[in-house]
Image (spheres, rainbow, N blue to C red):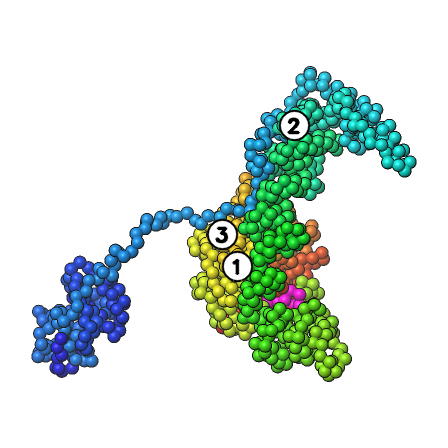
Amino acid sequence: MSDAHGAQVRYPVWRGQQAVAGLWLPADLLNAQQRGERLLRWWAPGCRAWRFDRGPARGDLLRFEAERALHCDDAGGTPLCRIGAHGLYAGPLTAAEREGLAPADVHLVLGGQSLALDLADGEALDPSLAIELDDYALHDTFVCDRALPKLQPDKIAGKAVRELLGDRIAPPSEERQRFLRALGRDRDDGNGDGKPGLLERATGVRDGAAAWLLRRFPGLGVGFGGGGGAGGFGSGFGSGADAADATSSGAAGGIAQRRNTVLPQRWRAALARMAAASGAARLIGLRQGAYLRRLLEQFDHGDTLEALRHALPIDGDDAGSLGQSFGTPGRRDDLSLSAQRNVGASIGAGHDIRELLRQRYRRAFERLDGAGKIDEAVFVLAELLNARQEALDYLVKHGRAAQAAELALGWDMPADAIIRLLMLAGDAERATLVARRDNAFATALALLEGASGHRAHALSLRREWGRALAAQGRWLDAVEAVWPDPDSREQAARWLQTAEAGGAELSARALVRRAALLPDTLQHYAGRVAELTDPDAPAAPREALGQALATIAHAQRNQALARIAARALPALAADRAGGANALERAQLDRIRALAADPWLDADLPAWGVPPTPPALPLWERRAALEASLQADPGLQAPLDLAALGDGRWLAAFGEAGAAMFDAAGRCLKRYAAPAHRLVIGDSGEVALALARRESVWRIARLDLTGHRIEDLGALPLQFFADRFDGVAWAAVAGQRIVAFDAGPAGEGGRPLQVLWSVGDLGGDIVQARFLRHDELFLVAGRGVTTVWHYRTHPSRGLVSREPVEVPAHGWMLLDPHNTVGDVVIAANEDGGMRFSFRFSGRNCAIDLEPPEPVGGECESSLIPLARGFLVVLHGVYRMRAYLIRRGNDEAARCVARIDWPQARLRAREQADRLVLFDDEGRAMSIGVETSQVRSVQLR
């Protein structure tokens, strides 16, 4: 390398389009990785590269295999061009400037001076080493047309009786199938399936005569009647001479002598069977009556196993029976039990016939139980008698808790019973899934703790309960749940610390819990106590502190709680006098008693708490709430938004992630997880961030207290709820209604595990609506469209399945009570707009004033809400939103009128507030119970 000390170079670089022979990549502007990337970018066979690490010019040199026509501004380095045969030049040096330069391979220009480089001074580079693959593991090629993520199997789906018992129960007979098919057809003539023959008609006459004899002479059927009603056969059961003797003996005051067992006479049994067949024939046809007679004969002759193949299930409890209807929807075609608790084909041919069958089935169960045939016995209980709880108890009695749990799951028994059976069977994983699905830890724990010998099961379930509560963001409840277990108190202390790091109100409540459970540690929180009890500090956290102190039971009182109460009470009383909190006098008195400070009692006057202004629930208002929002937009435009506690907000900004804002709109925390939609936990401490990825949604869980992000995976979702309890989250995926486990993996959760699902709805789900305790789905089937209504509280269950007529525009309002329809917004005669709908069969309407005077009909939009509608009328510069309540009045009622700058307005219903927001960073929250309004512009 040599320096040229000639005159200053006038043009140090090339400009415009040039025939470039190489590039200089200076080290003072580009690091080694960047230089390597640019070498690879321009590399081609025949190129050479060198690196210069010493001297005034340091960097990499690339020489092309041939000159290339490049625009110098796009080269990504200093272009080098040839001038004659004198090497490569970094700029268009004139002949005068080239005079006196030493011969060199490259001439650079630094600081206006020419600098010569010799290739021999550089280190030759091999750019192929940057893409060398020897150190990389080889894998099979990726299939680009990979299928969408599949739903995980439902681990808590139960089994039917036949699936559970297997080959130990003989398959149902074909004749029984024909009988059930006949029951499934409506008929008014009672002729059965086909015209009966001569023999069948003669048999029918005989059976009818037997029925007449029993009605005329009830004593003939003693011991075989069904205890039927008036006029039915067997109505004289228990009314013969023997019964009279027993009555008189008992009246004498002594103990009746044990009587010898009297075997039933065969002719009496035959007479009862004929009468039963006659009763069935009158209802369902001669052939079916004959089938019933043969079935009774098989039981009476002791042919129990063959009788089970022909046996007919009888109605169970009223909740699971459709009554005496032969055309029941969803009947069973075989003897196996459905996985849902619906009604299959059962015989409903009158009380007397059912009672006869019930007696035979009960005696068959007793014989099978006595013979030790547990499988056959439980089949009779579960399938024929529909005594499901008795069948479960019978299995547990014989040490078959696992089988009982499978049946309980298939029958959709109460969650606490299912959890108990699963825990007894040693299946803690599925017991936890059921408890997380139905939030049924407390009742199941009470069952286990109340039974002897199940302490280990109860302890395991208690720990899972704590983890589930922590997953829901209910940190303090989780602490209370596991505190009785000494081995879990270390984990409880960590949850308590998490709550203390949360919002101001949650932190205040956590301080009270710490004082109650860990009083010796309160000395380390003296600063926090002083901050909360300072009268000049915000009143809301102090009110939360006071409410927590007022709930302390007498047995939990200690000196640490007394000190906090004594310091907080004066400030709480001052806040109450000034209307800064809503504590009642009884709560203040409890805090005063907790303080137990005689000096404080002497200083405090006999207070009189001023009356609390009556709360005005939003949907019960008689006078409309008036509110407006400033025209100034925020600095950030959210795609979705929700209100949190402590006046905070959570907003979704698409690929930029999510962010938490304070009451003034200042950003508190950002979450680096793509978020197009938000799903908020009921506690307000957890959320899901959903990002659309072509045909799937990417799901991330946000811990808003500990500020952690967990990627749960991706799912092909069609519809989903915008709220969840922190664990169970409802959605529609793959034409199935599903409840997913959206809890964190670290708190006992199984991310996106299926907790509950329903498929085979008879069509495609084209519309869904998720309310707090109701879920509605519009299913378009072949020739019929139905609305499926599920109730989610206290447990999931189907409420109704109703066919509907879909309007021509293809959208309909899904209402849980099916009472709203014909929603119309149109211009009225006064230049305004009229909103009308039908509610419970009545026409309701209200006239609405547009935000600006308009001629004719103005643009409008409608958002259905749980208790009414949000009707938005659009002007040129502003718009006006009306909250319209559904009710029993003839005229619809407006409960709120809100003026809003022109923008796209959206709404989110939360448990205690209604949130309105637009795409320009403006938001408003209205308290459902208080009508309190707060607004924000996101900065």
Instruction: Give the mark nearer the N terminus: 2 vs 3.
Output: 2
Residue at position x 72%, y 27% from top?
280
| Residue 513 image-quadrant placement | bottom right
Q: Amino acid at mark 1?
A: Glu
Residue 456: x, y in percent? Answer: 60, 53
User: Which is in the foreground here, disc 3 or disc 1?
Assistant: 1
Task: Give the Cα separation between the discs numbered 2 and 3.
Answer: 51 Å
Q: Where, quadrant-wise, is the N terminus in this rendering?
A: bottom left
Q: Amino acid at mark 2?
A: Thr
Say which residue label 1 marks. 747
| Res. 304 mark | 2
Residue at position x 43%, y 49% from top?
148
Stretch of the chain drawn in magenta: 924-931
837 left or right of 77 in image: right
Q: Is residue 1 above or below residue 394?
A: below
Q: Is residue 910 above or below residue 781?
A: below
Task: Give the Cα separation between the discs numbered 2 and 1.
Answer: 52 Å
| Res. 498 mark | none
Residue at position x 77%, y 25% from top?
263
Q: Amino acid at mark 3?
A: Leu
The secondary structure type at the circle numbered 1 is helix
| Res. 717 mark | 3
Proximity of marks 2 and 1: CB atoms separated by less than 8 Å = no
Mark 1: few, some, or many residues within 10 Å (few <14, many ≥20)?
A: some
| Residue 856 image-quadrant placement | bottom right
